[in-house]
Amino acid sequence: MDADDLKRMVDQAAKATRDLEEPLRSIAFKSILERLLTGGAREDVMAPAPPQASGPTPIPSSGAAESAEVPQITASGLVEAILQLLRSPWGKHPKTLREIEEALRINAIHYPQASIATRLMELTKRGKLRRLKKDGLLAYVYSGKD
């Protein structure tokens, strides 16, 4: 990828988010640019790396073990779904945006990452969630306040 390709992708992401207000604009811009830079593939569903010349070939994870931990929820909206997940034993330990997005997907609840991030921020501001650092990333845990 050369500088012209990078500039084109940045311009495309900026154009797609120009009508949004902050902080949603920044969140959406980052998400769109990330997808453009990775060729439209999300990090958690990209093909596994080719096997190394030496050693056994790794078996890609199907995610089945992870989905066994995720509670089955039924919610009428995104906020309710997030709260159900984080109130459950699965949500006892802080969860990143990606982990929450994956848990929602497992429960057939599909929202754009920017929408999930916005709701997490709103719930944090209202005191329903606490935001912590987990491996250098923001992570969320239920505050215990209703």
Image: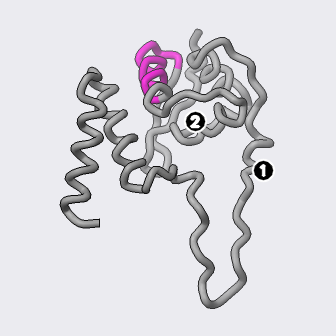
Residue occupying image coordinates x 39% and y 41%: 31
What amino acid is labelled 1 in the image? Answer: Ala
* Number of numbered callouts drawn: 2
Q: Residue furthest top?
A: 146
Rendered location of residue 115, percent (x, y): 46, 25
Quadrant where the image shows the C terminus: top right
Q: Quadrant of residue 4?
A: bottom left
- In the image, 68: left or right of 27? right
Residue neighbourhood size for the residue with mark 2, other residues' Cα within 10 Å, grouped as few (<14), some (14–19), many (≥20): many
- In the image, 62: left or right of 96? right
Label 1: which residue? 65
Q: Is residue 17 above or below residue 135?
A: above
Q: Principal SS element in the magenta part?
A: helix
What amino acid is labelled 2 in the image? Answer: Glu
Residue occupying image coordinates x 46% and y 50%: 40
Q: Quadrant of residue 133?
A: top left
The secondary structure type at the circle numbered 1 is helix
Quadrant where the image shows the N terminus: bottom left
Q: Is residue 94 above or below residue 40?
A: above
Asked whether 124 falls inside the magenta stretch, the response is: yes
Rendered location of residue 66, percent (x, y): 73, 47
Asked whether 132 falls inside the magenta stretch, the response is: no
Residue neighbourhood size for the residue with mark 1, other residues' Cα within 10 Å, grouped as few (<14), some (14–19), many (≥20): few
Residue occupying image coordinates x 70% and y 73%: 58
Q: CA distance from mark 1 to mark 2?
A: 16 Å
Q: Magenta region: which residues?
A: 117-128
Rendered location of residue 101, percent (x, y): 58, 36
Colour scheme:
one colour
Label 2: which residue? 101
Q: Residue furthest bottom?
A: 54
Rendered location of residue 29, percent (x, y): 32, 37
- In the image, 61: left or right of 79? right
